[in-house]
Image (spheres, rainbow, N blue to C red):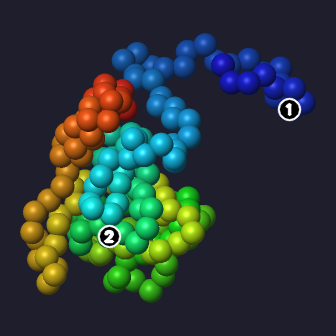
Amino acid sequence: MPEKATSEFWRELKPITTVFQPNALPEIYTAHAATEDERYYVPFTETVSSRPLWISPSQNKWCDVLMAKKAGLVNRHYHPHQVFAYTISGKWGYLEHDWTATAGDFVYETPGEGHTLVAYEHEEPMKTIFVVEGPLIWLDDKGKADGYFDVHMYIAMCKAHYDKVGLGAGMIDAILR
């Protein structure tokens, strides 16, 4: 139950009793999603880490907080599906575009986009919520496919890191939907 309403016009409203349909899984609630506790951030590259918030193996999707504490780089990659991003703090962009995202900025990436994600030096770490659909296709310097990264690799990477730092792989199992 959320906190008790005091002056809100809806304070006498009762919650519905049938919240979930049969076989539905519960929601995922994550307090302090963009935590400062670095154990929750899985190293993605040498300079960028990912805090998993929700993962759907059957849909090959995930939602995370991507973080770079200083100048950072995510390998060049191509998205065959759409991606959504909301910037919490810091500064980042794509070498291939003419904008730079800062706190409060939203980005929609269309399917079929290739780019090089960079994080800039900033007084705050770059923290951005991403919703990624489908795999990332790694690209070489000429923009040609050079490997891939999908949800199953993401799950394995996250479980291994969470075990290593003492959080336990079960934390990842708890956010699979």
Q: Position of residue 177 (x, y in %)?
A: 34, 32
- How busy is the neighbourhood of tag 2: few (under 14 within 10 Å), some, or many (20 plus)? some
Left or right of residue 149: residue 33: right
Q: Which quarter of the figure is the N terminus placed in? A: top right
Q: Is residue 151 in view?
A: no
- Residue at the spot x=74%, y=17% of the render? 14
Type of amino acid at the residue the image marks with label 2: Leu
Q: Which residue is mark 2?
A: 73
Residue 54 in picture, x, y percent from top left: 39, 39
Which SS class for mark 1?
A: loop
Q: With 83 as the anchor, is 91 left or right in this view? A: right
Identify residue for label 1.
8
> What type is the residue that disc 1 sits on?
Glu
Residue 76 found in image quarter? bottom left
Say what secondary structure mark 2 lies in.
strand
Q: Nearer the viewer, residue 102 or 121?
A: 121
